[in-house]
Amino acid sequence: MNVRSRAALLSLSVFALVLRAPASQAQSLTDTSFFNRPVSSAPVAQNVGPTRAALSVAVQQSIPPLTSPSAASGAGLTQSQALMIVGGAAILVGAIVGDTAGDVFMVGGAVVGLYGLYRYLQ
């Protein structure tokens, strides 16, 4: 593979990954549950003396604990999405390595990425 075809393949892979980024709407304010959260009332029990909670003057949000440890693992990616990401990373590594080993990485990354895309579209 010459330099032009590698650069074209790399830019096409990066463009495809950017279009399918799962966190692209992570900062969207369309979630109505954010605006409809009930405001917690002040604690009923009065503490005597200074407390750690009284040290902060900022707005504090209580975060509920996770229901299971498996909910935090995996970053919310399915196996097919992970395969596409690994395939794109292998293509990038192959473009950086170059020569015959780079070609092997790029072809292998393309195979893994396309298999992930196939499973994702099923």
Image (tube, rainbow, N blue to C red):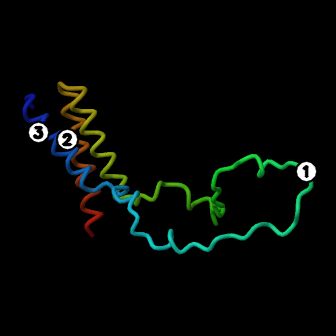
With 7 as the anchor, is 65 left or right in this view? right
* Residue at figure coordinates x 40%, y 58% from the top left: 26
Q: Residue at x 37, y 53 (%)?
A: 82
Left or right of 111 on screen, residue 80: right
Marks 1, 2: nearer the viewer = 1
State the residue in front, 103 or 85. 85
Return the mark for residue 49: 1
Q: Residues within 10 Å of mark 1 (few under 14, many from 20)?
A: few
Q: Residues within 10 Å of mark 2 (few under 14, many from 20)?
A: some
Q: In the image, 87: left or right of 6?
A: right
Which quadrant is home to the N terminus? top left
SS for dot 3: helix
Marks 1 and 2, how far apart at CA: 67 Å
Q: Which residue is mark 3?
A: 8
Residue at the disc numbered 2:
107
Name the amino acid type tagged 3: Ala
